[in-house]
Image: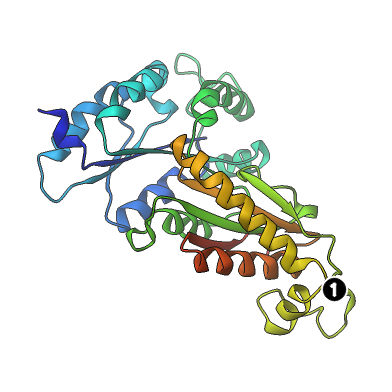
Amino acid sequence: MSDTNLQDSELIILTGMSGAGRTTAARALEDLGWFVIDNIPPTLLLEALELASRSSDIKKVAVVVDTRSRSLFAQLSSVLSDITPRVGSVTIVFLEATDESLVRRFESSRRPHPLQNSQGALEHRIIDGLSREREILGDIRAVADLVIDTTSLNVHDLRRRIEAAFDSQNEGDFHITVLSFGFKYGIPVDADMVADVRFLPNPYWDEQLRPLTGQDSAVSQSVIEQPGAMEFLAHFQDLLGTMREGYLREGKRLVTIAVGCTGGKHRSVAMTEQLASMLRDKGLQASVFHRDLGRE
C-alpha cells in the first residue's frame, strides 16, 4: 500500500479521560460521516488507515484510542510521529472533566474505572484510577489540537461542540470556537485564550435587562454600545488574525476563545456573539457556544 493513498485521508485521534464523553463524541463524528473505530491499539493505526483507504467512500477516519489499551497506549506518540507525515491531516481531540464529575459518572453507572483494578481485584478507589490515567495521558493532552472540558456539558452540548468543529459544511483551514462563560463557575480549562469583559457595565443592575440574556437585542445593544466594547473586540480580532498564521504553521487549526463575565449571562454572551460575527465577516470559520447560559 503506497503512502500516497493516504494523503487524501483525514484522521481524528479521539482520546481523553474515561467517563469524559468519548462514546458521545464518537457517535457525533459517526453521524457527521466519519468512519469511527473504537478502542484500537496504537500499533494498528496505520494498518487500519490503509485498510480504510481501499474503500473509495472512506476518507475521514476517527479512531478512539485510550488507556483501555493498557501498556500498548504508551506507543501512541511514536506511532503518531510515523503516521502524521503520511496522512493528509491528523487532529487530536482530548476530552476531560474534573475528578469530582468523573467520580460521580462512574458511581452512577456502577462501573469501575479501567485503571482502578489490579490483577482483576478492585483494590483501589475510582480516584486512584483517574490519577493514574491523568499521568499516562499527560503527554498526549499537551499536544492535543482540541481539548474539550465536559464537566458542565450534557450529551447534547458535547455533540454541538463536536459538530461545530468537524461539520464538513464548516470546514476551513482555521476554525475558532468562541465560548462564553461565567468566572464564578470557573475558567474553561479547554480555552486557548481568555478574554475578560467584566470591564463593561453589568446589565444585571438594570431591572429591565436583568431577566434577559446577551442573546436578546436589548442586552446586546446595551453591551456593544458601551465605551470601549467595540474597540476591545476590534483589537482582539486583530490579535487573532496575527496569531492565525503562527497557529497554522504549528499545525493547529482548531482554536477556542473564551469570553467571560461574572455569571455568563449578559456581557460575555453578547460579546461572544458579536466577536464571532466579526470573525465571520473577515472570512474566518467561527462557531459560538455558551457554556453557562441558563445556569442562573
> Within 10 angstroms of label 1, few (less than 14), some, or many (20 or more) residues?
some
Q: Is residue 48 above or below residue 266?
A: above
Depth check: give the residue in front, 113 or 66.
Answer: 66
Splitting the image into 4 quarters, where does residue 4 fall? Answer: top left
Q: Is residue 76 left or right of residue 185?
A: left
**What residue type is disc 1 on?**
Tyr
Q: Number of callouts in the render?
A: 1
Q: Does residue 111 sit above or below 262 in this rendering?
A: above
**Residue 83: x %, y % from top left:** 29, 26
- Residue 265, x across and y down, in percent: 73, 68
The residue that appears at 83% across and 66% down in the rendered structure is: 200
Q: Quadrant of residue 271?
A: bottom right
Q: Secondary structure at mark 1?
A: helix
Q: Examine the rendering and report whether any part of residue 189 can be seen.
A: yes
Quadrant for residue 233, please give it: bottom right
Which image quarter holds the C terminus?
bottom right
Say left or right for 172 vs 94: left
Report the residue marked by disc 1.
204
- The image position of residue 86, as x and y in percent, is 25, 29
**147 lies left or right of 54:** right
Image-based side of 97 in relation to 22, left or right:
right
Image position of 262 with respect to 244: above or below: below
Q: Residue at x 73, y 84 (%)?
A: 218
Q: Is residue 148 above or below residue 283?
A: above
